[in-house]
Image (spheres, rainbow, N blue to C red):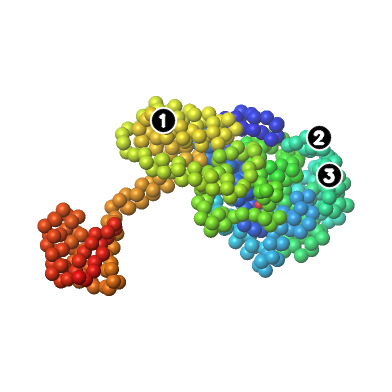
Amino acid sequence: MYLYNSATHKKEEFKTHTPGHVEMYTCGPTVYHFAHIGNLRSYIMEDVLEKYLRYAGYDVNRVMNITDVGHLTSDADEGEDKMLKGAKREHKSVMEIAKFYTDAFFEDCRKLNIKRPDVVQPATGLIDDYIKIITKLLDTGYAYLAGGNVYFDTSKLERYYIFNDHNEEDLAVGVREGVEEDTNKRNKNDFVLWFTKSKFEDQALKWDSPWGVGYPGWHIECSGISMKYNGEYLDLHCGGVDNAFPHHTNEIAQSESYLGHPWCPHWCHVAHLNTDHGKMSKSKGEFLTVSLLEQKGYDPLAYRFFCLQSHYRKSLVFSWENLDNATVAFNKLIAKIAALDPNDGPVDEAAAAELKAKFTKAMDNDLNTSMAVTVLYDVLKAKTNGATKCAVLEGFDSVLGLKLLEKAADQRKKQAQMAAQPAAFTVVSESGEEDADVEALIRQRQDAKKAKNFAEADRIRDELKAQGVEVTDVPGGAKWKRI
Ligand code: AMP
Ligand code: ZN
C-alpha cells in the first residue's frame, strides 16, 4: 500500500515496525463543544484508513486521546483553557462538560459508522505518565523551568520543523499577530510541558507535581498516551492538517528527545472541510453538526458518502447543494443494490477477484476513496450474478462503512411490505352521509369482485338497489347515493 507521508513529503510504501501489525494513533477531540462535520471529516477518513488496513490483513491497535485538559484557546500555548471556557459558557463543571461532549462525540461517530478506537484515553487519566516524561526531559536538558512553568527547549534539537519547509519568521509564535509573547520562553518555538503559572489562575483541574500544583500542556498528552498504549515504536500517526504545526511537531520533539530514538515514521494528515468563509472551526463558532444534518432530513451516512467522494489530502468545500447531490447519488446507489437478488446462485469467485483487485488498486494508491466509490458502480455493471455482486459489495463496505447492504435489504423489505398491503379502498357517499351498513355491503361487493365472484358482486349491487342505493366505482374506491 502506498500512502502519502507528511514527514517525508512523498507517497511511500507503507511499512510497519512489526510485520503484519500496525500501531496507530489519532488525535482525538477537544471536548468543550460538539464536534463539527469538519472534525468528523478527519475521523471518517481515519476510520476508512484503519478499516482498510484491517481489510488488507493487518492487525491494528488504534489509540486515541480525548483532550479534556490543557488545550488553550490559542494553539501557541496562550490564552484560556478551552475546557474551562466551555464550562463557563454552560455553567457546568469541567468534568461535566467533558463527559457530555465525549458522549456526544461517540454518538456522532455511531451515526457516521465510525468505529471506536481500541483504546480511548482522556488526557486527565495519565498525569503521572506526563510527569515521568517531563522529569526525564528536565534531567537530560531538553526542558527548563521558567516563571513556574516547564518549557521544552527547541534549540536542543537538530531539526524542529518536520512537516513543511516553514519560514521560521512566519511561524514564530511570539511575533504572531494577536498572540502575546511569553517572556519566559528562551526560544520563540519553545512550548509548555507543565503549567503552574498562567494568566488564567482559575484553571479548575490541577495536580501536584515536582514543579508545583498545575496542569499539563496540550501536546504532552498525545506523546504520553501513545507511548503507554502503542509502545515506543509507533507506525502511523494521523490527525487533521491543522494539527501538523505546532501540535504534531511538538509531539515529535518531546517523544524523540524522551525516547532517544526515532518515534513515528509515517504521518498522515486529513485536509480541511471548508465553508465559503474558510476552514470550519469550533473556535469561530460557525459550525454544522451531525444533529443539524439530521434535523434537516439528511442521512448522516450521505455525509460520509460525500466525504468519500473526494481525496483526503484535498480540501473539501461544504455546501448544501453539494450535500444534496451526494444524497441523490447515495440513494440511487442503494436503490440499485436493492434491485439485486443476493441469493440468485453461487458466488463467481473469478469475477469477484477481478472486482476486488480494482478496489485494492484504488485504495492502495494513497487511499483513493473517490476511485473506490466508482468501483462500486463497476460492480453493479459487471456481467455476473446478484449473489457475487452483493458478496463483493459487502467486502468493500467493510472499509467504506456506508451500510450499503443493510440499507438495500431494508429497502427490499419495505417494497415487499408495500406490495403485500391491500390497496386502500375508500367508500364515500355523494351527499356526505355516513351509513355503516351500506358501507359494509359495498366493501363485501368489492371483496367478491377481487375474488372474481362476479355473481355475488352483482347480487350485492341488486340488494343495495333494492334499498334505494346506487353504487359507482371510482379510482381507489366507490361512491354511493340514494335514488
Ligand atoms: P479538535 O477537537 O479541535 O481538537 O479537533 C479534532 C480533529 O479535527 C483534529 O484532528 C483537527 O485537526 C480536525 N479538524 C479541525 N477542523 C477541521 C476541519 N475544518 N476539517 C477537517 N478536520 C478538522
Ligand atoms: Zn494529538
Instruction: Point out the residue furthest to the front here.
Output: 483
Taking the spot 60% from the left edge, 61% from the top edge, the residue there is 100
Q: Residues within 10 Å of mark 1 (few under 14, many from 20)?
A: some
Per the rendering, the mark at residue 158 is 2
Name the kind of residue labelled 1 in the image: Ala
> In the image, residue 254 lies at what x, y percent?
75, 43
Q: Considering only order in the chain, which callout, 2 or 1, is on the residue closer to the N terminus?
A: 2
Between the C-alphas of marks 2 and 3, the distance is 17 Å
Q: Which residue is mark 1?
A: 382
Q: Considering only order in the chain, which callout, 3 or 2, is on the residue closer to the N terminus?
A: 2
Nearer to us in this view, 242 or 66:
242
**Does mark 1 have its CB less than 8 Å from ligand 1?**
no
Between the C-alphas of marks 3 and 1, the distance is 56 Å
Q: Quadrant of the C terminus?
A: bottom left
Q: Which residue is mark 3?
A: 172
Nearer to us in this view, 206 or 75:
75
Q: Residues within 10 Å of mark 3 (few under 14, many from 20)?
A: some
The label nearer to you, 2 versus 3, is 3
Q: Work out whether residue 221 can be spotted.
A: no
Between the C-alphas of marks 1 and 2, the distance is 55 Å
Name the kind of residue labelled 2 in the image: Glu
Taking the spot 49% from the left edge, 45% from the top edge, the residue there is 328
Question: Is 292 situated above or below 137?
Answer: below
The label nearer to you, 3 versus 1, is 1
Question: Is 298 situated above or below 200?
Answer: above
